[in-house]
Every structure is written in C-alpha cells, then in structure tokens.
Amino acid sequence: MAAAGNSDGSTRRQAQEIGDRLSDLPDNILHHILSFLNTNYIVQTSVLSRRWRSQWENVHALNFEVLHHHCHVRQAKFREHVVEFLSRRGGPDDSAAVSSVTIDVNNAAWELETDLFDTVMKYARTLRRLGVHGSTLATFFYANFDELAASLTAHRHHESLEALELGRCSLQNGDAFGSVGFGSLTNLELRGCTFSSCCDPFVGIPRLNRLKLDSCSLSMCSLKISGLELLSLEISGVYSVRGIDVVAPKLKSFVFHNYSAACLENLELPSLDRAIVRVYWGDRRGPDAARIQKNEEYYMKLLRGLHNATSLTLRFDKIYYWKWKEHEFPFNNMKSAMESEASPFTRLKILRVEYPLDPPPITLHDHVIRYFFERSSNAEEKIVKFEKGKTS
C-alpha cells in the first residue's frame, strides 16, 4: 500500500512539473499550441490558473468543429457555442486578430447555416487560412460555394486568404474561383466536392501553387486544370465520366491515386520532377480480364504524360500483395505493350515500387527496365527500389 501511495505521489509530482514547464512557455508559443485544439477545449484552459485565465482569448486560429463523439449535438447548440465564444473573446483588435478559421460540421446530421458562417467571417478581420467542411451525414446537402463566396467578398477576406480548404461543397459556377478574385490564394484543397459545371475553374487563381482534389465528383462534365504558377497537384479518388486535362508548365510534383487512369485525358507537364501513381489493376485470374487490359492501356497513356519525371513512384494496394508472384507483377505481363512503343522517359533516374507490407521477392523483367530507362539521359545512374510504403 505504501509503495502504491508513493507511486501515485510521484506521478502527481511529475504531472505538476510538466504542467509548470508548459505554463512557463512564452505567450506566443502557448497560443500556437492552443491553436491546434477545438474551441470547446481551449476555453476550458481558463480554469487552470490565473496565468491561463485569458490565454484562450489571444489564440489566432479558431477551430469550430463538431467532434465525432458530439455527432448528435443539435444545430442550435453548435450555433450557441460559436456565438458565445466570439462574444466572450471580445473585439478582434490587432493583438488578438484571427488569421485562421475552421468550421467543420462533417460529423453533424445538419448543414452549416450561411448566416452563422457570415457571423464568423464578420468577426475575423484579415484571414489567411479558412477551412469549411460540410456534413457527410446530411447525405443530400452540400455547402453552396456561391453563398460562402458572397460572405468572403462582403468582408474582403478574398483579398487576404492564402489557404482555402473546402469539404462537401457544391461548385455550380464553372468560374467559381475566378469570379471571386482570390488574389493571394496559393493553397487550395477540395474534399468531397461536386462540380456541376466544369471548364477551367482554377485559372482565375493567379498565384495558386498547390492544389489537391480528394474524392470529388465531376459528374458529366470535363475538367481542365491549368495554372501558370502551379507547383504541386494531387488527385485522389476523383469520379469523372468525361475527362481531366492538366496544363501546368511549372508543376514539379504530381500525385495520382485513383480507381482508374481513364479520367486523365491529357497531361502537359514540361517541368515535372516527381510523380507518384496508384491505380486499381484488378485480378487477371478473375472475370475482370477485359477491364484489366483496358486499364493497362489507360496506364500506358498516363505514363506517357509523365515522361519528364526524374523520380517515379508506383504504389500498390494491400489486397494485391497476396496475389502477385513474380510472373504476375503487372508490368512483367505487359511485354507486348511496352515493346510496341519507345520509352517516353527522357530524364528518369529513380523508379520506386512501394508496397504497404514488406516487399515480396519480385524482380522486373528486362522489357520493363528498358521501357523506363532506355531513352533516359540518367540511365547510367538509375536506381530501382522495392520497398515498404505508406499505402493502405
């Protein structure tokens, strides 16, 4: 019993020492740490001590999020929390200016109210980062980007925003971003968004250098992605009946994770340096043999579009790890396709094959090595790796 008591006392002292060390940090570091927390939690720090009483009022990043374990919270309750938090925080003077806002109702069964969004935008003075995530539980409802954009322009945030993240948002206007006039926006991330009318929606963002499309639906429209300053592009889980054209003269990094490469119509990437690709292949031994052949054609077309890459990573999913032996590795089975055309790669130096588990004993056949390195100016320095990756 005594030993247990001593252990408990030691644990309490250690906790107090850690707490004291945290309290001794400068205010700006404390504010940065608190900026990663939900607003529900940062308010609670005010009861820790006199030092902490008003620290939450000076946090520059506000995260209003319906947490997973609060998924049944009523819409009125969430609204009450947001309004009360802003009123208790006080006026947005220069010392407590809000530079980042996240409003996330992803776990709620209702949609974000436009007037509540406007209340937050009115409170914030000069935003540099904004994240808005609609509900995935309210299946048939998406946040309307036109309504969000109207609030942004009314409070002039469109001029200062550098990073914008949208989730479950409906983009009905083909020039949705260009019509807003995002003069400072460099980073745009869209998750689960729908495009009703697609032309070249990103061309109107002159300084955009990073774009990510995740689980977006293009429905029956084709999409063109062009950007004179675009440096990084990631496309993941995008559904498209028509196709996607990418024209980016300065693009350095391209990541493509998709069910099929069929949606990619044209790639013009003259400055490409690094490419990471993962597409679904199917099981050659099953009923999908015809689809696999078609997917191989799409894959070859994709590789031709990546011909300027110096580093190429091919990722494969866990499900195929157990199916493939050396002779079943996809590229080893594509001899006729790879020998029927000249290698498109002129600068390739590194070819990496990633698996989610420990790499199986696979070697690439000669025709595969020739296809990737035959015309490369870096062929003498080529590096081929099979390694454990981060794919799921």
Image (spheres, grey):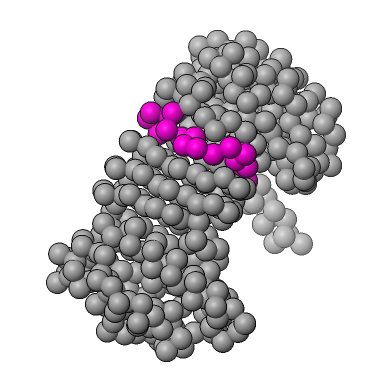
Residue at 27% across, 84% down: 366
Q: Nearer the viewer, residue 315 or 21?
A: 315
Q: Position of residue 160 (x, y in %)?
A: 46, 20
Q: Tell me if residue 78 comes above or below residue 237 in the rendering.
A: above
Could you say which quadrant of the image residue 348 lies in? bottom left
Question: Taking the image as drawn, is residue 391 in sight?
Answer: no
Does the segment drawn in magenta span residue 199?
Answer: yes
Q: Quadrant of the N terminus?
A: bottom right
Q: Tell me if residue 381 comes above or below residue 235 in the rendering.
A: below
Q: Position of residue 237 (x, y in %)?
A: 56, 55
Does the segment drawn in magenta span residue 357?
Answer: no
Q: Nearer the viewer, residue 188 or 103?
A: 188
Of helix, strand and loop, which mostly describes the magenta segment? loop
Q: Quadrant of the C terminus?
A: bottom right
Which residues lie in the magenta part? 191-208
Q: Is residue 61 left or right of residue 366?
A: right
Residue at 21% across, 61% down: 347
Residue at 24% across, 77% down: 370
Q: Is residue 157 left or right of residue 254?
A: right
Q: Is residue 126 left or right of residue 233?
A: right
Q: Position of residue 232 (x, y in %)?
A: 38, 45
Q: Nearer the viewer, residue 182 or 318?
A: 182
